[in-house]
Amino acid sequence: MIFQQLNMKELIQDWKKLFSSQGLTEDLFAGAIVASVAIPLSLAIALASGVPPEAGLITAIVAGIVCALFGSSQLAVSGPAAAMAVLIATAIQKFGLSGIYIIGIGCGILQLATGVFRLGFLIRFVPMPVIAGFTAGIGAIILIGQFPRILGLAPASDTHLADVVLYISRSADQIQWPTLWLALLTLAITFSLPRILPRYPAPLIAVIAVSLIPWLFNIPIETIGNIPRSFSLSLPSWTAFSSNAALMELVADIFLVYILASLETLLSSSAVDKMTRAKPYNPDQELIGQGLGNIASAIFGGIPVTSVIARSALNVQAGAKTRRAAIFHAIFLLFAIYLFAPQISRIPMAALAGILISVALRMCHPREFLEFWHTSREEALIYLITFIVIVSADLLMGVQVGIAAALIVALIRLTYVKTTIHQESNRPTQLCIDGPLTFLSTSRLDSMIAKLTASDLQHGVIFDLSRVPLADTSGASHLIQLIEQLQTKSARIALQGIKPSCRKVLLSVKSNIDLAKLIATDMAELFDILHLDKQDHSLDRLSYGVENFKRHHRGAYKFLFKKLAWEQNPHTFFIACSDSRINPNLITSTEPGELFVLRNVGNIIPPCHTTDIHGESAAIEFAIGLLKVKEIVICAHSGCGAIKELISGTIFLPENQSRYPGIAKWLKILNNIRSEFPTNVTAEHAAKLNALYQLEQLKTYPIVQEKLNAKEIRIRVWFYDIGKAELEEWDEQKNMFLIIGSEEFCSLERRIQSGSQYQSPIIPE
């Protein structure tokens, strides 16, 4: 059972690749590169976390091996993270080293449980602005906390900016200027070297260079000190948690570390996925690996770990092929402790402070805030609130306040309602409601109705609810009350564009009016409800539609329209009837620029004649020859007026030929198929026969035959059932129409994609 929950079967298959020679050189090289960066960073993060320097290296070694073995992401590298440093330092101040070991084990158990029970998706519920603000806040705290260190002073007891500045001013006579210069030199190398020599590990080179200066010039400087060469198991003491208050505080810190470590891990793994474009990682399996890594790290005296984006990205860039690279990085770190412990012990604290400041500056870079600001001011505000509370108050409070702010913003967005009034003289007043119709939108509705005057009601009122995504009974009840209020002023009311879910809620509310009679499903019903003349008010409907397009849709298509302004590149030539009930873009969910549409009465394609040139032949040649479409769809439909006229033959009566000469002449093109109609043929059957006949007509065009022979186009024959809103496609092998999306249709698609030849259809009897 445990074997299955840990996904060991799949992991063992991956572990077998560890012993393959394929990619071994690349993994060794990548592991060495990542280790060269991990050494100074692990030491610096240990310094910021308030633990002995060797704890940072132990963490990187243990996590590097365990997380790589049991995680899902192939190329992610785990270890101590700067984002965790402040949390760990705060926990150590409260509970000591025993507390941080318990937090590490607790965090690991929670991550393990989250992965085993497949709950990894829940971690993603923390909003991105809160995560970004939290990370920036931690960066600011690290930055402030290192100010005394780069001046050669002992760490300040408080990390608030004002307290640190006051502490430094009081200790000005104790400032060690060599320490400051060494820290600034570290900072300069760390930032400048990647621009000159991007392939070299800047942090390691900076630390080595700065470590040589005190040794060469005999400058007295504080160093890391002794680095032990052995690992020891850590058994935490529970004596500090005898009180319930301390225990509850410990539990709160465990959850905070768990959430942050898990988020950092999933974000890092997602970033690695994008860089490698490999098999997507499994978030649950990744959390299992992180959980085991945290437990192992705590047992060996390390601190909580995460998957680290900087080291993971470097691993990918260095050419790593498998999870071996992360394991090699850990082995190189282990060798460094045993082979270079004396040299590591002589690294100046100033160098590590400089490394930490470089990391902190990247963490709280304003670029991310500016991106939020340009994208969404509300999310920028959430970022700012989280950042300010973390820096000025407390980490846990910062997360809580940030999430609360995000929930408030989400609630405002969810309940925000925009109302507009469209008025023209001698026309109905149109009231557009844009947003959810809930109890929170009642005041907006009241203010909209209050703006109406008696003259506005004279020609009727149209409530446009097409942009209302949802409604509750309170909002629906209030809208009905307003309708009743307007009816007492003798106003005629109509509702249009109601979605089925909203309609159900509105009709469920008890009222004194028959609301169903006020709901218009089309413009004809709207005119009837308001007692309007269709000719007088159709133009008003169009002008309102244009305004609605400008207000709600033009902005959404801004970039698409800019592109389409220069060229069109449709993939499909769509041949359909002129019937007003057919909307090709609607039924195919396509955007402007995707379909090149030919519409006429009866979706007729006249046979090709070199002497008789018509609009249809021009459209066919333009679509296939110039636009080079890849698909052609001939779409018939139910209830086709042209087909009904063809079946009845009344259009060919002398009196109708003289009255409608254009229709009569046009439908004569179908005389051949009309003679083949079975007795008592239905309009639907005739429409389908007509579509198949048009396919044969289309193939009389040389350009169509040329492209078919070259297999450069595919022709489909569709039938649209208006009442059912269902599309069917002709299957020439089964000699029948199949509903698009059905199981039978999917097998047809597979046959077509496998390259089976397209055959001419057999006209069904």
Image (cartoon, helix red, strand yellow):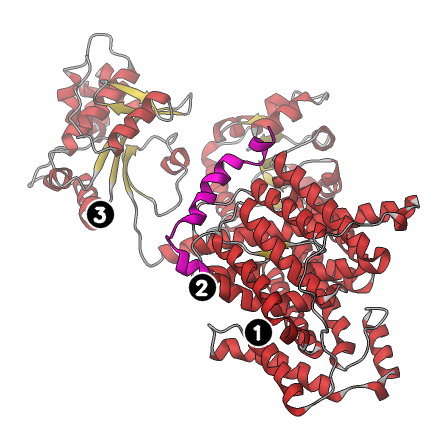
**731 sits left or right of 313 in the view:** left
Q: Is residue 115 above or below residue 353?
A: above
Residue that badge 2 annotates:
29
Amino acid type, callout 1:
Leu
Secondary structure at numbered mark 1: helix
Q: Is residue 635 above or below residue 307?
A: above
Q: Position of residue 419 (x, y in %)?
A: 65, 44
Give the mark nearest the N terminus, 2 or 1.
2
Residues at circles 2 and 1 in contact by the CB criterion of under 8 Å: no
Q: Position of residue 290 (x, y in %)?
A: 62, 47
Name of the residue lying farthest toward the right = 243
**Is residue 80 in view from this perspective?**
no
Q: Position of residue 235 (x, y in %)?
A: 78, 49
- The residue drawn where x is 23% and y is 28% is 663
Secondary structure at numbered mark 3: loop
Give the mark nearest the N terminus, 3 or 2.
2
For label 3, the crowd category at 10 Å Cα-Cα, with few meaning under 14, some 14 to 19 and many 20 or more, is some
- The residue drawn where x is 86% and y is 83% is 171
Q: Which residues are magenta?
A: 1-28
Name the disc covering residue 628, or none: 3
Q: Main secondary structure of the magenta part?
A: helix
**Is residue 32 in view from this perspective?**
yes
Q: Nearer the viewer, residue 457 or 20?
A: 20
Residues at circles 1 and 3 in contact by the CB criterion of under 8 Å: no
Amino acid type, callout 2:
Phe
**320 sits left or right of 251 in the view:** left
Would residue 457 be counted in the magenta stretch? Answer: no
Quadrant of the rendering where the N terminus is positioned: top right
Q: Is residue 680 above or below residue 529?
A: above
Q: CA distance from mark 3 to mark 2?
A: 49 Å
Name the disc covering residue 204, or none: 1
Quadrant of the rendering where the C terminus is positioned: top left
